[in-house]
Image (cartoon, grey):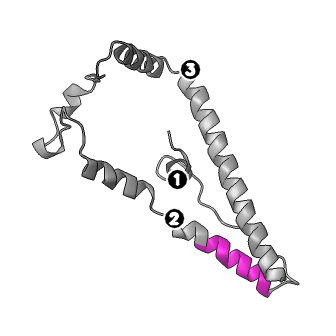
Amino acid sequence: MKKDLIEIIRNENLEIGCKKVRIEIQREAMIGISKEDSILEAIKQREIAKSQGREFRDYSNISNFSKLPDLLKPLDTGITDDEFQVYKDFNSIPYPDIEAQVLRDTEKLLDDEDEKAPEPVLPIPNKNNRIIADRFIKL
């Protein structure tokens, strides 16, 4: 009974924590976007194209594309459904290290009720480790 209660509370806390992280990251991202002139200009150009009923195409990076091999150059038609599915599948890859650590910490708490369970160890995001942003931001 006690183990079931702890598991329910742990799962709810994880869900609440993840939601709060996602909301805070989205809030900070929107603040950053609202201050970035180049992003605001790109949004404006897209809105103009949409209001005129035409498809928006961003050619600002076209010079970079010329350096790519032909197989990697973007097509005017965009990506296929199969290619898009690859991105969706990659985005849905779970992060078992975090989940495994939380499970180990919970098991330690249940097994050693008299001892204090260790704090969960979560990776610190940085420019090389975008676990939180990649997992929770869905823009």
What's the magenta region?
100-111
User: Residue pushed farthest bottom?
Assistant: 111
Q: Quadrant of residue 3?
A: bottom right
Residue 66 quadrant: top left
Q: Residue 133 at x, y = what percent?
A: 54, 47
* Residue carrying label 3: 35
Of the residues shown, which amino acid type is indicated by label 2? Tyr
Q: Is residue 117 visible?
A: no
Residue type beneath disc 1: Arg
Which residue is drawn at the image coordinates 66% and 66% (left, top)? 121
Query: How many marks overall?
Result: 3
- Above or below, comparing residue 33 to residue 10 in the picture: above
Residue 91 position in % (x across, y down) = 43, 54
Task: Characterize the local packing of mark 1: few (<14), some (14-19) or many (20 or more) Cα atoms within 10 angstroms.
Answer: some
Disc 1/disc 2 C-alpha distance (Å): 9 Å
On the image, the x and y values in percent for residue 17 come to 71, 54
Provide the residue designation for mark 1: 135
Q: Tell us which disc is closer to us: 1 or 3.
A: 1
Image check: 127 left or right of 2?
left
Residue at the (64%, 34%) spot, across then down: 27
Q: Earlier in the sequence, mark 2 or mark 3?
A: 3
- Circle 1/circle 2 CB separation < 8 Å: yes
Residue 57 as seen in the image, left or right of residue 40: left
Of the numbered discs 1 and 2, the one sitting upstream in the chain is: 2
Q: Which of pointers 1 and 3 lies earlier in the amino acid sequence?
A: 3
Circle 2 — which element? loop
Residue at label 2? Answer: 95
Secondary structure, mark 3, is helix
Magenta stretch: helix, strand or loop mostly: helix
Tell me, for residue 25, which label it has, or none: none
